Image (cartoon, rainbow, N blue to C red):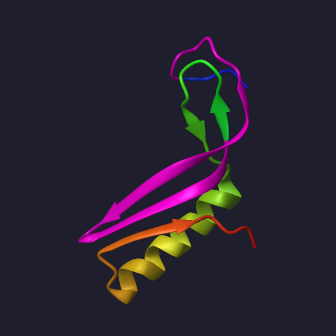
C-alpha cells in the first residue's frame, strides 16, 4: 500500500515499537507486526493486532502498572 504520510513510499511487512500511554501508565511494546513504509518509516498496524494491543493496555492500566516494556506475543 502507498504511505498516507509521505505519499511516495510503499509499505512492506515489518515490525515496530509502539508506546501507549493512559492516565499514569506507560506501556512500550516491541516487535509489533506492521506494514512499514520503506521511505519514511511510518508503521501501520492492522485491526486484529490493534485490538490485542488495546486489551493488553487496558489490563496494564487496571493492574496499576506505571511503566512496562514488553515484547509482542502473537496468540
Task: Please state which of residues 2 and 33 is positioned toward the viewer in this rendering.
Answer: 33
Asked whether 1 falls inside the magenta stretch, the response is no
Residue 51 in the image, given as x and y percentages of width and height? 61, 64
Q: Residue at x 52, y 50 (%)?
A: 17
Residue 57 in the image: above or below residue 39: below
Q: Is residue 71 above or below residue 75?
A: above
Q: Quadrant of residue 44?
A: top right
**Residue 27 lies in quadrant:** bottom left
- Residue 40 position within the rendered picture, expressed as x and y whole percent measured from the top left: 53, 22
Q: Which residues are magenta?
A: 5-34
Q: Is residue 61 above or below residue 8?
A: below
Q: Image point 24% across, 71% down: which residue?
A: 24
- Outermost residue, left direction? 24
At x 62%, y 54%, the residue is 32
| Residue 38 position in % (x across, y down) | 65, 22
Residue at the spot 57% in from the left edge and 23% down from the top edge: 4
What secondary structure is the stretch in magenta mostly built from? strand
Q: In the rendered image, which quarter contains the C terminus?
A: bottom right
Magenta stretch contains residue 22: yes
Task: Please name whichever residue, 70 or 5, is drawn nearer the observer in this view of the structure.
Answer: 70
Amino acid at each position: 500500500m502507498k504511505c498516507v504520510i509521505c505519499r511516495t513510499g510503499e509499505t512492506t511487512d515489518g515490525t515496530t515499537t509502539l508506546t501507549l500511554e493512559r492516565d499514569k501508565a506507560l506501556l512500550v511494546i516491541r516487535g509489533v507486526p506492521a506494514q512499514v513504509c520503506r521511505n519514511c518509516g511510518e508503521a501501520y498496524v492492522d485491526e486484529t493486532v490493534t485490538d490485542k494491543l488495546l486489551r493488553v493496555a487496558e489490563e496494564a492500566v487496571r493492574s496499576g502498572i506505571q511503566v512496562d516494556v514488553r515484547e509482542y506475543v502473537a496468540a
